[in-house]
Amino acid sequence: MKKVVLAISLGMVINGGLVDQAQAFGPLGHRVIGQIAENNLTNDAKQAIDNISNGKSLAQLSTWADEIRSDKNWDHAGPWHYVSIADDETWQTVKRSEDGDIIAKLEDFERALANPNLSASKKLEALAFYVHFVGDIHQPLHVGHSHDKGGNAIKLKWFGEQTNLHSVWDSKILNHQELSYTEYTGFLSHFNADDVKAWQGKNYYQWADESKALRDSAYQLEKNRDGEDDLRFNYVFIHKPVIEKRVQQAGVRLAEKLNQILAK
């Protein structure tokens, strides 16, 4: 039954038929990451992805893992989108979720993509999850504090509208630019060879450590005249470059990993 659900739901997402749910980096950020990665794939990786996805782009696949949150068949996948770790914990001391977390699932889906005996439907599922989770782990609040659910429990205002801190970092800062994902990809595709060299060659724990190191700045909130947390232009000015760099890094690293995993 799950294979049937996967085929139907993934097909609907690819054709743009599902309404977006709560997304990490939001559809915009994930699609930019997918497109940056696609622009940096080797020919072998491009062909392998084309075979797995029936010609669909990484940008098209990138939002499926969030869109299935409305499907109860995938309730068990909720914890896969993040990992919780306190400031004073390390990966050796932290108690990891028994239901899996983003690092464990990236490792699982990497192995799945490299498995030549995996069924076509399972390989497509692995690719869609992998593309999405590479993006998620680069959003600092997806390597978050358990006590506030990665900022989801921090209620505040965004230009006067009620929201939460996690949502601001997932989508609102990027969406504030009012760009299409193709426009944003063009703007963020200008990185030099030194940047790429510095970003590549790191493992999933190192990606997570980068996010952990960045997350504290997200909590430096602005207040309005009524004393309420109300984030506006100054918050965008400070944090947009951070988020854009994480999107760039995620795209470059996704390409790097897929080029390695899918090499002939």
Image (cartoon, grey):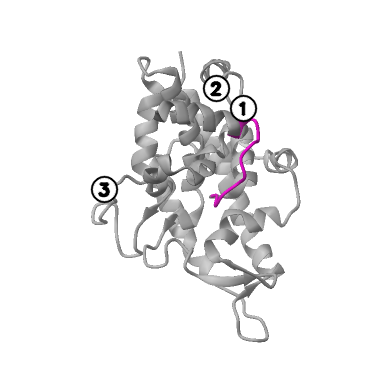
Secondary structure, mark 1, is loop
**Residue 14 counted in the magenta span:** yes
Residue projecting furthest to the bottom: 226
Measured as percent of width and height from the top left, residue 59 is found at 62, 34
Q: Is residue 13 visible?
A: yes
What residue sits 59% from the left and 55% below the top? 242
Query: Residue 72: x percent and y percent?
Result: 43, 44
Indicate the position of residue 70 as horizontal and vertical percent values.
Answer: 50, 46
Q: Which mark is residue 233?
A: none
The residue pinned by badge 1 equals 57
Q: Secondary structure at mark 3?
A: loop
| Relative vertical location of residue 260 with respect to residue 134 in this rendering, above or below | above
Judged left or right of residue 154, residue 189 is: right
Q: For residue 144: magenta? A: no
* Dot 2 amino acid type: Ser
Q: Earlier in the sequence, mark 3 or mark 1?
A: 1
Q: Residues within 10 Å of mark 3 (few under 14, many from 20)?
A: few
Residue at the image position 51 percent from the left and 70 percent from the top: 219
Q: Earlier in the sequence, mark 2 or mark 3?
A: 2
Query: Where residue 98 is drawn, which disc sits there?
Result: 3
Question: Residue 252: horizontal and vertical position, in percent?
Answer: 56, 36
Whether residue 181 sits left or right of residue 85 in the image: it is right
Q: Is residue 53 above or below residue 134?
A: above
Is mark 3 in CB contact (under 8 Å) with mark 1? no
Q: Which residues are magenta?
A: 13-23
Amino acid carrying mark 1 in the image:
Ser
Q: What residue type is disc 3 on?
A: Glu
Gap in angstroms between the C-alphas marked 2 and 3:
30 Å
On residue 53, the disc is: 2
